[in-house]
Image (cartoon, grey):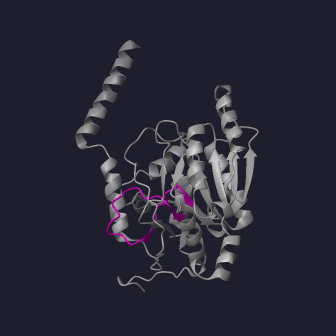
């Protein structure tokens, strides 16, 4: 127990030579998903190589095939680079023969690797990490491996407003910009938007949207209607339905550099530009319940992204004018 009355796990492998050797021998595999963004991929890999435990970790890279001939050259450049990567215990590259798309690629790759190793650390090609990212993930995977309620670990929290939060805390919503999990928790994953829309009550939808502040449920609807084909919202739904929690760190250890219009499901957005810290996370909370302050901070952040009343009226008027002009032309 710390001075603040909070209970924290003791990381015995940090100072016990024998336990450290066992720990290092059983690090979680890293899985990286890539496509056609060479510059982003290089930044992601170069940052990962600087990580504590990088040279002791197995790296699996899934390279999706080009969707069209237009991007074939870009995909070829990425694949050529992937074969030059060094600095890890082993590197396995899976080059898809056909285009799977990001969601199918991740679902298949995560399922295969986590089923084989029992745990996994996952990155996409636009997630730049702190040098302490892998240590945080592996420490957390060991600390919480027998805690049924903890179903995932995230290295990214949406806002830098974390000053009053403990070094680690728990929240139900899941952030996928650098994350890890265990096989027993990924087993709950199910991509079935039809089922969710049938079974979620209005109260559950409100809670799922972080008390009405977020925009999570709309992603489920868009998947159901075929406007989106994504995966992360369904892992969040699995965690939510199991009344599970996600472990977060006070200091962001990763950031998304792909919110620049190049990502598959992300437009240009500066709101998510948080800082990345080189802080080693040492105190893993054993007070396993949702942190109400963290939930409040997340709620305030998502509310801040919503357009104001006047912006909504303006956008509505613009849409009406657009429809009227179209009807007049017709």
- Residue 265 visible in image: yes
Say how many tags the image has.
0
Left or right: where 261 falls relative to 76: left
- Residue 229 visible in image: no
For residue 157: magenta?
yes
Q: Which of 291 and 242 is in front in this view?
A: 291
Q: Which of 310 and 199 is in front in this view?
A: 310
- Most extreme residue toward the top is 329
Q: Nearer the viewer, residue 236 or 223?
A: 236
Relative image position of residue 85 (x, y in whole percent): 68, 48
What secondary structure is the stretch in magenta mostly built from? loop
Quadrant containing the N terminus in the rendered view: bottom left
Quadrant containing the C terminus in the rendered view: top left
Magenta residues span: 152-179
- Most extreme residue toward the right is 97
Whether residue 45 is situated above or below residue 121 in the rendered picture: above
For residue 188: magenta?
no
Relative image position of residue 256 (x, y in whole percent): 48, 48
Whether residue 242 is situated above or below residue 86 in the rendered picture: below
Q: Give the residue displayed 32% in from the left and 69% down from the top.
A: 164
Q: Give the residue displayed 71% in from the left and 71% down from the top.
A: 25
Q: Give the residue displayed 26% in from the left and 36% down from the top.
A: 313
Q: In which quarter of the image is residue 60?
A: bottom right
Q: In which quarter of the image is residue 171?
A: bottom left
Relative image position of residue 40 (x, y in whole percent): 55, 42
């Amino acid at each position: 127990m710390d001075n603040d009355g909070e209970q924290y796990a003791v990381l015995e492998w940090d100072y016990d030579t024998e336990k450290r050797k066992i720990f290092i021998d059983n690090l979680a595999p890293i899985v990286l998903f890539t496509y056609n963004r060479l510059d982003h991929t290089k930044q992601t890999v170069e940052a990962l190589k600087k990580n504590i435990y990088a040279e002791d970790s197995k790296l699996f890279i899934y390279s999706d095939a080009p969707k069209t001939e237009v991007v074939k050259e870009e995909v070829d450049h990425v694949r050529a680079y992937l074969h030059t990567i060094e600095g890890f215990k082993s590197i396995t590259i899976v080059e898809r023969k056909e285009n799977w798309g990001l969601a199918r690629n991740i679902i298949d790759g995560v399922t295969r690797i986590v089923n084989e190793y029992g745990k996994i650390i996952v990155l996409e090609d636009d997630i730049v990490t702190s040098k302490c990212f892998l240590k945080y993930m592996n420490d957390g995977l060991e600390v919480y491996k027998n805690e049924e309620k903890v179903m995932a670990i995230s290295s990214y929290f949406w806002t830098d407003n974390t000053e009053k939060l403990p070094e680690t805390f728990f929240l139900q919503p899941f952030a996928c910009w650098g994350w890890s999990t265990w096989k027993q928790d990924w087993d709950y994953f199910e991509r079935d938007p039809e089922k969710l829309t049938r079974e979620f009550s209005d109260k559950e939808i409100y809670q799922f949207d972080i008390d009405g502040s977020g925009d999570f449920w709309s992603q489920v609807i868009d998947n159901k209607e075929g406007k989106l084909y994504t995966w992360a919202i369904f892992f969040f739904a699995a965690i939510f339905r199991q009344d599970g929690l996600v472990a977060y760190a006070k200091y962001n250890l990763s950031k998304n550099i792909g919110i620049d219009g190049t990502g598959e499901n992300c437009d240009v957005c500066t709101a998510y530009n948080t800082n990345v810290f080189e802080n080693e996370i040492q105190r893993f909370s054993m007070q396993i319940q949702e942190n109400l302050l963290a939930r409040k901070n997340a709620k305030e952040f998502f509310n801040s992204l919503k357009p104001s009343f006047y912006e909504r009226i303006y956008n509505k008027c613009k849409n009406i004018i657009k429809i009227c002009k179209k009807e007049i032309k017709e």
